[in-house]
């Protein structure tokens, strides 16, 4: 493996590819019983267009768990503007919200007009004309989904965000790893990196332009920082031992990580500008998987200082790390909610390894996933969903669950394992 | 590389031949993924008197086989661990001892100890557990007189399983430290 890998090292491909491949598909696994009935009428004029904009919007809203879309076959009328809407028709179908719209091809692309109606209030809530340059109808559909989601829920939509994830195929010495970035719905995947050595732990910079990740392409782990748009990258660390678990500070100037250069893995903070590292934890135990609190003042991390892995919070102002989790003997890989009031983590229950949630103020832990081989939870920037890796039929797949545990969906890949998802920050 | 049961047991027998020639602690009980798949031309005895054709020796004496073994990288290069443990099981001490002898006899030899875990649990925590396993082997070798400059440790955590599967049989083959020369 050693000498072969050295040859292959030369072949580690850096691709900033516009070629979509290995798209993930969506399977809704659980709908919320509190989902709001909505109808998204097919946009008039969209026949023959490369994307079915209304379908993308409908799928987005359904996946969020906040909406229960009406099937198209039940739409007796298909109005395309608010003036044509018969409120009684939709009320009789128990629809609370209605989306109508028109699509038109223009010289430089497309123009989409949409309106959101409140059926019970008999009023138009929002409406907008969206200009699409080129063929980016999917991007426009995600944008419209964001507007609808926010108008109804008062929560900023996260449909225009991205996910990064790692793929793996093969076993033992014959493996291929890939790092991908895709739309939040798993579509339009683009390869960021491939290697015959492991790639892991991708982490978005807070401005969404860069990924930090761990790559073994030199036959040992090192942390790299790569510009997603240009593919340009630098090796940020290559210390002896583990170089792992990078996470960016909210201001993007520092990266917390786990390094074992001085013995056991400890939490360090690297200054991105000058690459200097400062040791944060000092224990005779494993300290890893740091996460930055949204206010930048604390680090959450996994430590086995009490025997097994548990989550601790360290105040960067000083003092001792405080243990946060006390339920069971395995709690690891914590992530803060965007408001900083909750943490999501992997908890080993009697059923297996599951995604759980805990209020920072209390110590009651609630399991929110139904699968039992879960890893790597990553929270959407609006806090509504948690994406994570799990197993389905012997393959690694991505799955997502709403923060309240009520709704969930899976994003299976055509082949191989998919793992290590990282939800991007808001990009617009 | 996955070995079939027969090939595995032949590989185990083969390793015992080598180890028995220079060790009083007996052989391993487990096969090894780096063992020979072609077991047909090698010794099948577990008594330690046969010498494997693959080793190119014809001395037929235990002492001769021992000298030969110390000049060659030991054939068994993987040891396995219990769930959530980093202690070297007694059945694998002879394997580590054989590597210690080889490294002491060959001060220019370098070994990279690759630590691995099964897939359960979180990836980066498993990276740390894999390092602990490889570190335990490194300390053992050190105590046996192997120079620190001859050894390094790389943990692969759960990233490079030896076999795929979600049962204890697969997990037990993935919790391992591999000697890479």
Image (tube, rainbow, N blue to C red):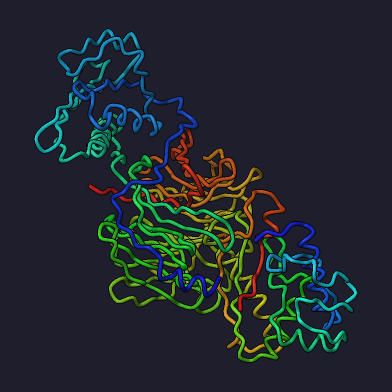
- Between B14 and A274, the residue placed more toward the observer is B14
Q: Give the percent coordinates (x, y) of residue B84.
A: 67, 61
In the picture, which quadrant includes the N terminus of chain A? bottom right
- Residue at point 37% right, 18% down? A71
Vertical comparison of A52 with A413: above or below: above
Vertical comparison of A304 with B60: above or below: above
Q: Give the percent coordinates (x, y) of residue A50.
A: 25, 32
Counting the numbered discs, the total is: 0
- In the rendered structure, the answer to whether residue A380 lies left or right of residue B165 reads left
- Residue at point 30% right, 9% down? A76
Vertical comparison of A106 with A88: above or below: below
- In the rendered structure, the answer to whether residue A198 lies left or right of residue B13 reads left
Q: Give the percent coordinates (x, y) of residue A404.
A: 46, 37
Residue A213 visible within the image? yes
Vertical comparison of A114 with A223: above or below: above
Q: Give the percent coordinates (x, y) of residue A110.
A: 15, 33
């Amino acid at each position: 493996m050693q000498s072969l890998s050295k040859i292959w090292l030369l072949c580690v491909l850096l691709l900033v590819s516009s070629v979509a491949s290995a798209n993930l598909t969506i399977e809704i696994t659980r709908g919320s019983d509190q989902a709001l009935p909505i109808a998204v009428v097919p946009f008039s004029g969209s026949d023959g267009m490369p994307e079915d904009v209304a379908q993308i919007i409908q799928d987005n809203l359904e996946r969020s768990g906040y909406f229960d879309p009406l099937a198209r076959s039940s739409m007796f009328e298909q109005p395309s503007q608010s003036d044509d809407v018969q409120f009684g028709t939709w009320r009789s179908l128990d629809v609370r919200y209605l989306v109508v719209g028109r699509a038109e091809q223009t010289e430089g692309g497309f123009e989409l007009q949409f309106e959101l109606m409140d059926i019970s209030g008999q009023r138009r809530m929002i409406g907008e004309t969206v200009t699409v340059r080129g063929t980016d109808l999917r991007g426009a559909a995600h944008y419209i989904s964001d507007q609808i989601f926010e108008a109804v829920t008062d929560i900023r939509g996260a449909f225009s965000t991205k996910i990064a994830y790692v793929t793996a195929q093969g076993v033992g010495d014959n493996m291929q790893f890939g790092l991908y970035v895709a739309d939040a719905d798993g579509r339009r995947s683009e390869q960021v990196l491939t290697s015959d050595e492991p790639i892991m732990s991708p982490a978005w910079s807070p401005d969404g332009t860069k990924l930090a990740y761990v790559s073994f392409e030199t036959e040992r782990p090192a942390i790299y920082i790569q510009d997603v748009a240009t593919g340009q990258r630098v090796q940020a660390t290559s210390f002896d031992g583990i170089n792992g678990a990078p996470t960016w500070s909210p201001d993007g100037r520092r990266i917390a990580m786990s390094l074992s250069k001085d013995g056991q893995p400890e939490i360090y903070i690297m200054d991105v500008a000058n690459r200097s590292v400062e040791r944060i934890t000092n224990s005779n135990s494993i300290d890893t998987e740091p996460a930055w609190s949204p206010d930048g003042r604390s680090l959450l991390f996994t430590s086995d200082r009490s025997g097994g892995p548990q989550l601790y919070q360290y105040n960067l102002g000083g003092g001792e790390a405080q243990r946060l989790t006390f339920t069971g003997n395995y709690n690891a890989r914590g992530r803060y909610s965007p408001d900083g009031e909750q943490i999501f983590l992997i908890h080993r229950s009697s059923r297996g390894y599951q995604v759980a949630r805990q209020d920072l103020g209390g110590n009651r832990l609630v399991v929110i996933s139904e699968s039992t081989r879960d890893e790597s939870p990553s929270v959407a920037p609006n806090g509504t969903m948690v994406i994570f890796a799990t197993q389905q039929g012997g393959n690694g797949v991505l799955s997502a669950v709403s923060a309240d545990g009520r709704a969930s969906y899976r994003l299976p890949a055509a082949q191989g394992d998919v793992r290590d998802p990282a939800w991007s920050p808001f990009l617009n | 590389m996955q070995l079939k049961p027969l090939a595995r047991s032949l590989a185990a027998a083969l390793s015992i031949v080598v180890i028995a020639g220079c060790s009083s602690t007996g052989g391993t009980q487990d096969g090894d993924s780096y063992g020979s798949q072609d077991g047909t031309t090698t010794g099948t005895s577990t008594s330690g008197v046969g010498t494997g054709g693959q080793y190119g020796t014809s001395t037929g004496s235990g002492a001769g086989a021992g000298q030969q073994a110390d000049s060659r990288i030991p054939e068994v290069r993987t040891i396995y661990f219990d769930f959530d443990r980093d202690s070297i099981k007694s059945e694998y001490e002879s394997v580590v001892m054989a590597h210690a002898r080889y490294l002491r006899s060959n001060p220019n030899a370098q070994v990279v100890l690759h630590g691995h875990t099964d897939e359960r649990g979180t990836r980066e925590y498993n990276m740390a557990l894999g390092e602990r396993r490889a570190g335990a082997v490194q300390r053992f070798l050190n105590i046996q007189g192997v120079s620190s400059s001859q050894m390094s440790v790389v943990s692969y955590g759960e990233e490079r399983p030896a076999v795929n599967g979600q049962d204890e049989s697969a997990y037990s083959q993935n919790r391992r430290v591999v000697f890479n020369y």
